[in-house]
Image (cartoon, rainbow, N blue to C red):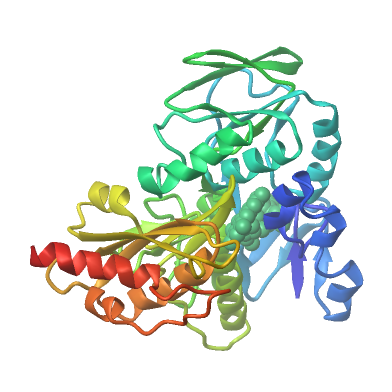
Amino acid sequence: MRVYTEFEDVGYSPCGIPYVHGREIPAFENLILQDKDFYAQQRIDVHYTTRVTRLDLRQGAVEVEGEGRVDFDRLVVATGFDYEPPGVPGDALTGLYYVKNIRRAMEFDELIEEARHVVVVDATPLGLEMATALAHRGKETHLVDPHPWLLSEVADPEIMKPVEDSLVEMGVQMHLTTRLEGFLGDGKVRAVSTSAGEIPADLVVVCTPKQPNNRLAREAGLQIGSTGGIVVDERMATSVEGVYAAGDVVELPHAVTRVPVQGLTGSHAYAQGKVAGTNAAGGRRIYQPVYVPWGMVAGKWMVGGVSFGETLATALGVPFVVGQAEGISRARYYPGTTRIRVKLLAEPKSLRLIGAQLVGGEGIKERCDFLGVAVWKGITIEDLAYMENVYSPAIGALSEPIALAAQNCLARLQR
Ligand SMILES: Cc1cc2nc3c(=O)[nH]c(=O)nc-3n(C[C@H](O)[C@H](O)[C@H](O)COP(=O)(O)OP(=O)(O)OC[C@H]3O[C@@H](n4cnc5c(N)ncnc54)[C@H](O)[C@@H]3O)c2cc1C
């Protein structure tokens, strides 16, 4: 088996990069899961820093820079994502950083050391992680985003408010409802031009939304969907026999709405890669439509959700009823207890759970995982209102915040 990558390394966790910049993780080397010998021993022939320039699907071959034409029996396309181009003047200046390749991250990390003013463009999940990391690092950090609240494409405003407040407390200067207009400088960036004026910048971290890196697939004639992702079936098979695709380059149906979605997470990419690889090797595995549990640390809070929140449901025209509550993560008298706000969305008639959003100081990931399964298995608000829960002062309060939100939803409906 042969693997091509443009990068110098494989099998490292890009997800950990912001935490090395923030110094929660001491070194980039900690993010590398296996050394290169490991893959050679598994008889995986990795061609590093080697670019594939064309897929010739009719002839069953790929064209590779420096190697020429290479035949294949089965092909898996996993070319990942590109950041949406900022689309403003000055984007060729040096000092603009796109977080992706670990080697570039190592170089950028040294520049952070010298920088005084850093601007983060777009309050996407990565934008929030990078703003948090730079604040930890003590840099003057500016976050610029055209929308009125953070993570506006996936999360609801009241869920994100504590995150915004905490970032401000940490010293991040917020420029919301502010349009990026250009990068200014002579060779190297010195400022960012916005609809609200200029912001000085020694470095800029561009965290625009992810889009599928579909050039090879598109030019080869693979079917591309409405999001720009490669269309695959449940075996991760593309529109061409013997060609599979996985990860950030594909689109998949959202399980509740059936609307295609792309730009999912590393956990989705990992699971899809295993399905695509197994099927390419002659096995039979199936990948399901996605419910998209997500979560992250942003500022001083954890935030997460499943499926969608009120904003996205409204934009999609999905009818819903809401149940909300604020509970606590441990017994109220136990040190370290934090608030947990839960917002549940359910179908109006059946009361089946269709989405959730959460913010709190701890215990968000586990609740998002649980609620993901709950949406998948058709659990209702009534089920959640009367769920059993663990009560142990150091790890859980008597009243589970999810149950409280469900009970509030039922009470509102009865009124
Ligand atoms: C900074 C950062 C933080 C993240 N944090 C999280 C997180 O906390 N949780 C989470 O679940 N996900 C996270 N993600 C997302 C996650 O890393 C991605 O979803 C996942 O890596 C996608 O895997 P992939 O294989 O589709 O693409 P990638 O991992 O991007 O791999 C694409 C590969 O294709 C190669 N390639 C592309 N074009 C060519 C070509 N023409 N020739 C040769 N090789 C080519 C590239 O060299 C690369 O090796 C994060 C991503 C980043 C960048």
Q: Position of residue 340 (x, y in %)?
A: 45, 60
Is residue 249 toward the left or the right of residue 119 in the image? left
Say which quarter of the image contains residue 2.
Answer: bottom right
Q: Identify which residue is drawn at 79% across, 26% down.
A: 115
Instruction: Residue lying at the far bottom in this picture: please name it.
Output: 283
Residue 151 can be seen in this image: no
Of residue 290 and residue 77, the one placed in the foreground of this image is 290
Note whether 363 is above or below 277 in the view shown: above
Is residue 61 toward the left or the right of residue 279 in the image? right
Of residue 267 and residue 80, the one placed in the foreground of this image is 267
Please state the quadrant of the image where ligand 1 appears. bottom right
Residue 136 can be seen in this image: yes
Q: Identify which residue is drawn at 67% across, 56% down.
A: 15
Q: Identify which residue is drawn at 85% across, 27% down.
A: 114
Note whether 104 is above or below 71 in the view shown: above
Q: Position of residue 389 (x, y in %)?
A: 41, 82
Note whether 231 is above or below 190 in the view shown: below
Q: Position of residue 251 (x, y in %)?
A: 44, 60
Say which quarter of the image contains residue 167.
Answer: top right
Is residue 110 toward the left or the right of residue 160 in the image? right
